[in-house]
Amino acid sequence: MITGILAGFAAASLQAASYLCSRGFMHRHASALLLLVYSQLVMGIIGLVSLPFLSTGRLFEEPSAFLWMLIGWLLAISAGQVTFFQALREIEASRLSSLLGLKIVVLAIIFVLLLGGRLNGGQILGILLSAIAAMAMNWSGSARFSWRGILWLAAALVTYSLADIAETHLVQMVRGKNMVSDGLAICAVCYGSLGLLTLPALKFCPRSRRMLLDSIPFAFTWYYAMAALFVCFGELGTVFGNVIQASRGILSVLFGAALAAAGFTALEESAPRKDWIRRLAAALLMAVAIVLYSLCSAQQ
């Protein structure tokens, strides 16, 4: 469990950083599609270069099951990336990052209603506290969300939830030496495949060395966030893993406050100190939710 929790916090840290990196690309080039294409190509290169040095264990012993799960993941993660980047055009990075904490509620509903799972009272309370904290972080400022932003956010929550479920199944298919090795291996396979499938998109996109270079910070932080997340899901399961991952809201608030204070308003909107204090209070509530869920899971 400790490995999974540490991996979850590592994923949260890298994801919080990746959101700000993506905001930088969007500020310079204003295209979610181009960020999607170029970042997936970079991540594909990272995955394919890494793969020869990693063990895929028994991943290919059931090729049909693996192929269908991989296809499902490819569709879900691609849709998730597009909808997330579109939402990012409407909602600032720290707010969107914390709003993605609502994915916990979506996953809990899928886990109970569609997958037949069970949650105890403490776990349900932890999930609800996480959702409340996510919303509180984002109602503390003066900006309002457009309907377009809300719809893109809802689409991102659903598609990312489906991708998380697929990731959990994929990493458990490896069954190699240890979960860290398994997570790195399946991440290389998945993102290597995604990079190869993205190649034809270059035919319809402007060729730009500048865009490729500008996509690297997001691609690097997102890729290794996902590698850590594979490990986290393999150890803890999808719902518990997302409760840990929700700590990215705390980190995003801190990163956003630092950027705004430093004058990088293109990446993060400046806000009064009282708003940042209220966001931090909500982030601490998120931390309480994580601890509560962890303790109640350990008692099962």
Image (tube, grey):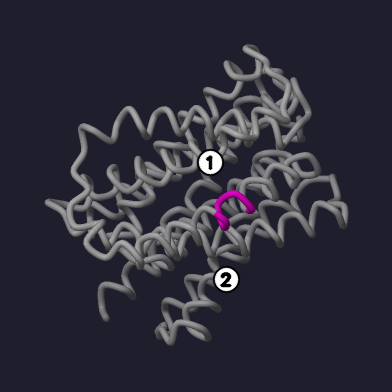
Q: For numbered disc 1, what is the local secondary structure?
A: helix
- Between residues 113 and 3, which one lies in front from this camera angle? 113
- Between residues 50 and 16, which one lies in front from this camera angle? 50
Disc tally is 2
Q: Quadrant of residue 131?
A: bottom right
- Residue 132 drawn above or below residue 271: below
Q: Earlier in the sequence, mark 1 or mark 2?
A: 2
Q: Which residue is painted at 75% across and 44% down in the image?
A: 86
Image coordinates for residue 50, horizontal then vertical, percent:
30, 31
Q: Quadrant of the C terminus?
A: bottom left
Q: Quadrant of residue 55?
A: top left
- Between residues 134 and 190, which one lies in front from this camera angle? 190
Structural distance between the alpha carbons of marks 1 and 2:
31 Å
Q: For numbered disc 2, what is the local secondary structure?
A: helix
The residue pinned by badge 2 equals 105
Residue type pointed to by label 1:
Leu
Left of 269 or right of it: where is 14? left
Nearest to viewer (mark 1 / mark 2)? 1
- Between residues 248 and 200, which one lies in front from this camera angle? 200
Left of 279 or right of it: where is 166? left
Q: Main secondary structure of the magenta part?
A: helix
Magenta stretch holds residue 86? no
Q: Quadrant of the N terminus?
A: bottom left
Indicate which disc residue 197 carries: 1
**Residue density around tag 2, few if under 14, some if 14–19, many if 20 or more, within 10 Å:** many
Residue type pointed to by label 2:
Val
Left of 122 or right of it: where is 38? right
Q: Which residue is painted at 66% across and 52% down in the image?
A: 137
The magenta stretch is 75-79
